[in-house]
Amino acid sequence: MNVEVTPLPGIGTRQDFMIRAGRRIGVITHRDGKFELIVSHLDDPDDCAASIALTPAEASTLAGLLGSPQLVAHLQEQHREVAGISTKQFPIVPGSRFDGSPLAETELRTRTGASIVAVVRAGSVHASPRPDFVFAGGDLVVVVGTADGLGAAAELLGGG
Amino acid sequence: MHNTAIALIQLGAVFFGLGLLGKMAWRVGISPIPLYLIGGLAFGQGGLVPLHGIEDFTHLSSEIGVILLLLLLGLEYSAVELMTGLKKSWTAGLLDIVLNATPGVIAALILGWGPVGALAMGGVTYISSSGIIAKVLGDLGRLGNRETPVVLSVLVFEDLAMAVYLPILTAVLAGVSFVGGLTAVGISLAAITVVLVIALKFGRYVSALVDSPDPEVFLLKVLGAALLVAGVASQLQVSAAVGAFLLGIAISGSTAENATRMLEPLRDLFAAMFFVVFGLNTDPASIPPVLVLAVALAVATTLTKVATGWWAARRQGIGRMGRARAGAALVARGEFSIVIASLTVASGAVDGQLAALATAYVLLMAVLGPVAARVVEPLARKFTRKRGTAPATA
């Protein structure tokens, strides 16, 4: 993908690329750290049909939503040969039980037999997080396990 | 009543009134600058309500307003941005100067203000308002548009042009001879080169001098440095505004960004005062005689700015609609036209009517600019449809 990086003097940087649907899509990073999601007009590629201001937290959530399914798909591909094992992702709902607590406190392995292989935060992947990794609201937890184990994990992480 | 009490009541009323005007202005989508000017015209000399006892304060705060306007203009773009801007957009920049300074020069010559007046009026009609334009582009959601970097690079070039122009103007206004004028040009070119080199190579030392992790200390140091440099520059017969501007360019990187964030509210406060004082010192009765000329200038320089933007955008392969948007975006004139006019009038070297003409002109352009940026799309669409030509996005 050919991402075009254009400096906007006095404002920040624009990074965008053409998608197959014929639109330009990208992000403006303001100097003060704000983000703007831009989507170009269908019949005027120079113009923006929408430019949506995002707070850093909102931007990272969106990045997680777009980025994590790919990671899961990738892991699924890797685990396909091992019968009975699959991969799933669970969100840490802001304000829920494990928001702000370290990974060890979930005792996921002991309770469900499934294991956490990665955490997606702000669009970046923290692979093999250590027991002292502290969850934050909006994290996506990627778990590998048996169907039963994943069901129990869903209950533990989601229901809390 | 006690003198201080009266002064406080007057100042309070002025600031509160300006606040209400500003709120009104942004609600209808125009810059508050023309309303501040009208506010100033309404008070004082020949106006409705005379102000007494706060002249010293308003005078000094309007000076600080100019210094902060120019300091933040200098801070707005980094030295690297200025250099790339110079390399990439010098043709558009030169066209911008030729097209937009000429109407002002011609108007001044017609009025018999001589070459000094022509130099000043050329500056008034040339310089776009980067403040109004950046705000309007953001409000209209056009920051992601392809023509926006073109618009910004024209503004960057104007910024550089100001760095050369202002020292020359102040030297000429001080009444130097032709040879002296050439020396002033040489000195100002040398000064801006030195400042750019300092900013590029040693910017972090200048920044380190004023930087501080503590916001309070930082604010005091930056403001103190700006006033010091401005004062010294003014003592050396270079205008205070120029000193502040060059300091702004020399401060770079994250220090510049923090300084901008910190000083913006202060600038808005003192700049509002500056516009009011400029309005105060302009007699409202002097405006009607120059109104026709101001309208003619407004029409001419609207067209020339649109042409500048159109041409610059076309060179970057932008479609017709984008070219029209780029042109209309550049139309707004504002704070820096008034700064040039106030420097000129303060020197006494040019007919006082210049203040009236500049006021009337900026009143028109600061309103017309944001309106033009808004209506250009529907207007251009209607125009192309009527002519039955290919779609505007060719």
Image: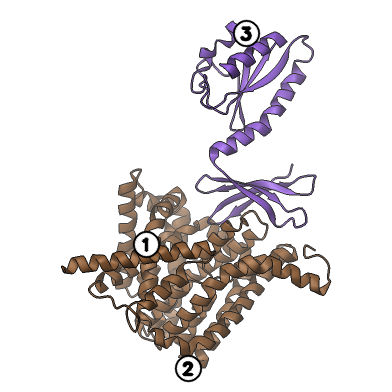
Chain colours: A purple, B brown
**Residue at the image point whose x is 69% and y is 9% from the top:** A148
- B380 or B173: nearer the eye? B380
Please tell me how crowded label 1 is: few (under 14), some (14-19), or many (20+) other residues with Cα within 10 Å: some
Please tell me how crowded label 2 is: few (under 14), some (14-19), or many (20+) other residues with Cα within 10 Å: few
Q: In this view, does B326 lie above or below B264?
A: below
In the rendered image, residue A85, in percent from the top left (x then y), is placed at 73, 11
Give the tally of numbered discs: 3
Q: In this view, does B130 lie above or below A22?
A: below
Element under label 1? helix
Q: Which chain carries label 1?
A: B
In the rendered image, residue B93, in percent from the top left (x then y), is placed at 60, 70
| Disc 1: which residue | B269
Q: How far, Cα to Cα, is label 2 from label 3? A: 91 Å
1 or 2: mark nearer the eye: 1
| Disc 3: which residue | A112
Q: Looking at the rendering, in which quadrant would you find the N terminus of chain A?
A: top right
Q: Mark 3 lies on which chain?
A: A
**Camera sees residue B244:** no
